[in-house]
Each structure stands twice: as C-alpha cells, then as structure tokens.
Image (cartoon, rainbow, N blue to C red):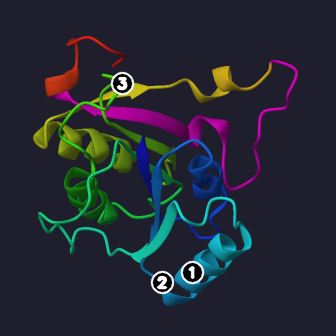
Amino acid sequence: MVLTRLGEIQGLSGLLAARYCDRVWLTDKDPQVLDTLQRSVQLNTDVQDKVKVEKLVWGTDTRDELPRFDVVIASDTLYYLTAVEQLWKSVDSLLSRERCADGSPPLFILAHVNREKVIDSELHKVAQGLGFVAQVVPIFTLCARSEPVPSNEHVKKEMLRLFVFTRAQHVGRGGRT
C-alpha cells in the first residue's frame, strides 16, 4: 500500500503509516514545515527509505506524472471555504484510479473540524462533481465509551467530522467500499 499525507506538519501520522505501507509521501507547502518533516524522517531511520517529503501546493500541481497513491489522508487542514476546491484538485490528481493490490478501493480519509457550516456541503458538492462518494464515520464511535469527549471553547464535538471518500466507480464492485 502507498499513502500520502497532505498538510503533515510534524510527520507523526505519516511516520506511523510508513511502518505498514510500502511508500509514504509527507506534504506541505511551507518550507519550515518541510524542514521539520525532513528532520523527523531522518530521526526515524527504520522507515526513512520509505518516506519522501515533498512540497505540494493544493490545486496547483496536478501533472499527470505525479505518483498515485492507494490512500490520501488529510487531517484538520480546511480552515476556509476557498481551500475545498484546491484540496480536491490535489486529491483527484494523487489518488489512484485503480483498485489496490488487495482489491480494495483507493481511499481519501479526511478528519475535519467544521469551522464554517458551508464547508461540509462544499466538500460533498466538489466530491460528487469529481465522481467521489462519501461515507461519514461517526467519530465518537471510535472512542471507548469511558473516554471523555474532547471539547473546548473553540471546538465542539458537533464540529468534528471523519469522512472516507472513494471514487464512485469502485462502489459495489467487490472488496471493501
């Protein structure tokens, strides 16, 4: 399995993924973040041969020769409505159009804090326009019942979202969807 992580910042999730994936790309647009990611990769010698740090500005680099990935992950990356279309342009360019080696469909996994109510609807609108369908994962079903629900004055539990997007062409054709 090959994976890319959009907007990585420290590299923790990407480095963890590298323990289970054949190839991982960690991306961001900020040169300081890219330097931090590169240092994180160098410190993790057991996975550094699998991990590549790349500059990616959403929506601007959509060349055909970009590598394709089985899984694209983004977490807490959408702060403004204007970023939604740019994010989707990059996801569409980076996510494989073919099923994975195990027969499962390629996935775009987005953990998201809905800071503007219109962002969720725009996410779905742009996704549909590109031929993607979404599964909403009830985020609090992932936590043990005894764990407190994360909340603070800026982020309420109702604002937390976890989406798994697949290309519509893969839905209902065997393997997991």
Q: Is residue 79 above or below residue 99?
A: below
Separation of marks 2 and 1 at Cα, in angstroms: 5 Å
Q: Residue furthest right?
A: 146
Q: Residues within 10 Å of mark 2 (few under 14, many from 20)?
A: few
| Mark earlier in primary sequence (2, 3) | 2
Q: From which residue to which does the magenta span run?
A: 145-168
User: Helix, strand, or loop for circle 2?
Assistant: loop
Pick the quarter of the image with the C terminus.
Answer: top left
Q: Residue at x 27, y 38 (%)?
A: 124
Q: Is residue 113 above or below residue 31?
A: above
Q: What x and y, as percent, mark residue 89? A: 21, 59
Depth check, front residue: 50 or 106? 50
- Residue 30 numbered tag: 2
State which quadrant residue 45 falls in: bottom right
User: Helix, strand, or loop for circle 3?
Assistant: loop
- Residue 33 numbered tag: 1
Answer with left or right where residue 70 lies relative to residue 131.
right
Depth check, front residue: 70 or 140? 70
Q: Which residue is mark 3?
A: 102
Magenta-colored stretch includes residue 152: yes
| Mark earlier in primary sequence (1, 3) | 1
User: Helix, strand, or loop for circle 1?
Assistant: helix
- Looking at numbered disc 1 in the image, what kind of residue is underneath it? Val
Q: What x and y, as percent, mark residue 172? A: 22, 11
Q: Residues within 10 Å of mark 3 (few under 14, many from 20)?
A: few
